[in-house]
Amino acid sequence: MAKWLITLGIILVGLGVLWPLVSKLGLGSLPGDIRIERKGFTFYFPLTSGIIVSLVVTFLLWLFRR
């Protein structure tokens, strides 16, 4: 369990460091991401971006398990 938590922590730190690069690639403004802007209110739900990130993390974990 501790090994998985450390691995997850390293992945999250890596994503945090790489976030400016990832945002330049368009992740976070893909079709399917829900964004509602009104006066004094903004709601953002990255549905498509979340699915893509989930698929990438699943693939990486699958590779590490082999």
Image (cartoon, rainbow, N blue to C red):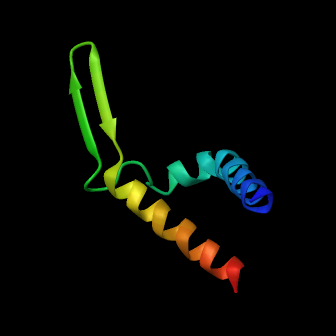
Extreme top residue here?
Answer: 40
Q: Residue at x 69, y 80 (%)?
A: 65
- Quadrant in the picture for residue 59: bottom right
Please report the residue visible at 22 percent of the width from the left and 32 percent of the height from the top: 36
Where the N terminus falls, by quadrant? Answer: bottom right
Q: Position of residue 12 (x, y in %)?
A: 67, 50
Determine whether 25 is above or below 43 in the image.
below
Count of numbered marks: 0
Viewer-proximal residue among 34 and 58: 58
Q: Residue furthest front?
A: 1
Percent position of residue 63, x then y? 65, 81
Q: Quadrant of residue 49?
A: bottom left
Q: Quadrant of the C terminus?
A: bottom right
**In front of the other: 3 or 24:** 3
The reply, left or right, for residue 46 in relation to residue 40 is: right
Q: Is residue 5 left or right of residue 58?
A: right
Asked if 59 appears above or below 57 in the picture, the reply is below
Residue 44 to residue 59: above or below: above
Residue at coordinates 29% horizontally, 49% vertically from top-left? 33
Q: Position of residue 21 (x, y in %)?
A: 60, 52
Q: Residue at x 36, y 47 (%)?
A: 46
Horizontal placement of 26 versus 22: left or right?
left
